[in-house]
Image (spheres, grey):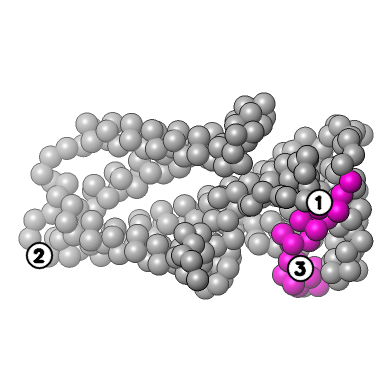
Amino acid sequence: MPLSLTSEPTLRLLLVGLAAASVLWGVARGIGRLVMLAVSLAVGGAAAWACFTLAPKPLADWLRLGHPDALAWAAAACGLFACWYFRRFLAALFRGPRLTPSGFGPRTRAGLFSLGPSLLFLWAAAMAARWTGSVARLHWVDQAARAPNPASLPDLPLLAQLREGLSSGLTGQILDRADPLNSPETSALGALLALRSHDSAWQNLLRQPRLAPLLQTDALRPLLQDNDVLYALSFAQYGKLLALPELSEAVRHPATRDALRALPVEDAIRAAIARAPALPYAPRAALAE
């Protein structure tokens, strides 16, 4: 089996390796330098988050014309620059030998105490990756439904693949309990709702027999009548859509949650889009009226 950088076993080893590396960093360089690095990475992550979620729609669409992950790479470049700049800024403010421990005892304590902030940082990074991956998957659904050749759909964006890896296996079970933003079921339901802007693909989706358990729970009907949900779908505000409490309430019922877990979401979406005829799409704003 070829190695996948976004698979759950690889990501699990990566998270454990980063936690171990932070302990070794604390032993060798001290917890002060580790905290400086963590703060710099947090600032870089916030800059990347803002670039990815707040980029103007014309700019985002223009970047995605070249590659589906172009916006994600641009956000990563912005985050790396912000991290580098802030790291240099902190290094200029805090310097001196007191940042580096000396002796066995201080080094051991620094390594043990380094585990706490490293785990907190890894949790925040995983939450950000899962959230941005969910938003990227909804944008992928919209772009795939608008593709001129529905028979050959592109692969999931890198962020969406990373979100799948962080939502499966043992890593996914742990992060699901620690994720206050959304769950895999919320992301799956949002991906299905993203097809609502494309009538042919939406009708094809509803006709699929494997969607029957979800339709029988009456989870979609209230959402499709909610003004906030329709507004977010109409104007492609997918971050706002995933944050709506209506989606969380819909997946809170056991029947709805079980139906979403058993449904192969990507396969159902691809099948709905592939069988959609090449017809012109209605403007987004018309759905909000």
N-terminal-most mark, 1 or 2 = 2
Q: What element carries label 1?
A: helix
**What is the spatial separation of the Cα atoms under label 1 and label 2, in whole angstroms?**
62 Å
Which residue range is magenta in the image? 255-277
Q: Is mark 3 on a helix, strand or loop?
A: loop
Which of the labelled discs sits on residue 1, or is there none? none
Which of the labelled discs sits on residue 263, or is there none? 3
Q: Name the residue type under label 1.
A: Ile
Which residue is label 2 attached to? 104
- In reply to whether residue 102 is colored magenta, the answer given is no
Q: Name the residue type under label 2.
A: Phe
Q: Is mark 2 on a helix, strand or loop?
A: helix
Q: Which of label 3 and label 1 is nearer to you? A: 1
N-terminal-most mark, 3 or 2 = 2
In the shown orientation, is residue 181 left or right of residue 193? left
Specify the principal SS of the magenta part: helix
Q: Which residue is drawn at 22% across and 57% down?
A: 26
Indicate the quadrant where residue 210 lies.
Answer: bottom right
Q: Name the residue type under label 3.
A: Leu
Q: How crowded is mark 2: few (under 14 residues within 10 Å), some or many (20 or more)?
A: few
11 to 230, vertically: above or below: below
Q: How crowded is mark 1: few (under 14 residues within 10 Å), some or many (20 or more)?
A: many
On the rendered image, what quadrant is the C terminus found in? top right
Q: Which residue is drawn at 17% across and 37% down?
A: 95
Residue 139 location, x and y as percent? 69, 43
Which of the labelled discs sits on residue 273, or is there none? 1
